[in-house]
Amino acid sequence: MVKDVIIIGAGLTGLSAGVELTKRGLSVAILEKSDRTGGQIQTFHTEDFLFESGPNTGSGASQEVMELYGTLSPRCEIEFAAKEAESRWIWKKGQFHPLPNSLVSGIATPLFTFSDKLRMLGEPFRAPGTHPDETIAAMTTRRLGKSFLDYAVDPFLSGIYAGDPHTLITRHALPKLYHLEQDYGSFIGGSIKKARDAKEQPKTEARKGVFSTKGGMENLPKAMAAFIGEQNILLSVHTNTVHPDTETGLWKIHGVQNGVPLEISSKHLVTTVGSYLLPDLLPFIAAPEMERITNLRYAPVVQVAVGVKEKGTLQFKAFGGLIPSREQEDFLGVLFPSACFSGRSPVEGMLFSFFMGGMRNMALTQLSDREIEEKTVQSFHRLLKFPKGMKPDMIRIFRHKHAIPQYELSSGERFETISALERKYTGLHIAGNLRDGIGMAHRITQGTNLGRIIGSATR
């Protein structure tokens, strides 16, 4: 079998590239080791609840995101979160407090110390940092103070990376924040200037805010697979070897699908799998180079879907609540999907998504299901304030060993090595969340742009 492009991995990146290539009339073969598409994205419907295993939402619908949903409509439609999603809660000393979203609320909040509130007023006048590999913790403390690190940035990173601000590098993990300081001199001044500049730019379809997919996130990869064509997506494939054929200039893939040998050739090979799978997949890459690609740590996460059919008088008008690491709770945070999107729970009920583990609490991910359920019920009462005699109507536990890649000090070396390898091996494209961001919008944007690059190169 000969195709224009072979894509390994039918997650969001691979499918996004496949959609763009299909639009451009190129033939693709997407190889997936599991028996389904979508990667970590999976939606469940049970007991009047609709809940996710994997990403619950995306943040910031880029132009590429909006174009993708437009291409897939009406089979699949984007859903933006209700206004409640604009509010985030932070846990401190036994209760949740709204995260400030203005200068006035920043001064009034109990989350930050008085001295750091004064530091915030002086933030626009501080000189930019000069260390390119400054950690997020160091940058935040330098510009805003330790209480901002503890009760704003630390829980924020727990929600995004399940990571440690003392090891995540700002320019890799939060490049927009890094460039606010480097390009504009400050976070506050840069945000104001960028908002003004945006008004003068040509309008695009891109939208800010939190988004999901109507009827559940899994409808997105299903619609993408249908657009690409089910015959072009090969599931349950074990890839044995991948190598460049110097005589033909093609990439050769040898594998097995359901016990049947499989051989495919193409001009372009796209990998979208985790870095830990690349040594076996690409054995022709020398060990020193491969080590620089696979020097990536992943945060393990346990996700617990919790549903109640009657929430009583309790109100959860927010995107969710995040828990700073210094509060020493068992969970990283709790999302409130049914407060943001339709059809997630009964009208009088609520759906919650608890997250446990991450880089700082890996041991918790090794607990048994029974132990995790006990801790979940305890936090159901402690964090969410449900009456002691009340229990959830639904609890489902999901484990993700390689949930979120950590963009730490090794990232720059990894990015440079990938670029060098792509120059060395014509037609090789090493993609996925080991580069270019970890969010849904990042994956769609990377895959779409990769499809455009390959499409232009094959004209």
Image (spheres, rainbow, N blue to C red):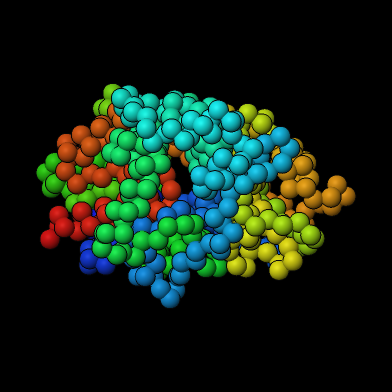
Q: Residue 247 sits in which quadrant?
A: top left
Q: On the picture, is 211 further left or further right than 225?
A: right
Depth check: 9 or 244 in front?
9
Above or below residue 5? Residue 408 is: above
In the displayed structure, does residue 87 sit left or right of residue 444?
Answer: right
Counting from the top left corner in percent of width and height, residue 49 is at 67, 63
Where does the C terminus fall, quadrant-wise?
bottom left
Tell me: residue 242, above or below residue 154: below
Name the residue rendered at 68%, 34% in the picture: 329
Where is residue 114? Give x, y as percent.
Answer: 58, 31
Residue 232 shows in the view? no
Q: How many marks?
A: 0
In the picture as drawn, the residue positioned furthest to the right comes out as 389
Q: Residue at x 48, y 34 (%)?
A: 120
Which residue is depicted at the point 59% across and 34% down? 112
Residue 302 position in % (x across, y down): 61, 41
**Would you say residue 310 is visible in this rendering?**
yes
In the image, what residue occupies the spot 56% across and 40% down?
Answer: 107
Residue 203 x %, y % = 29, 65
- Quadrant housing the N terminus: bottom left
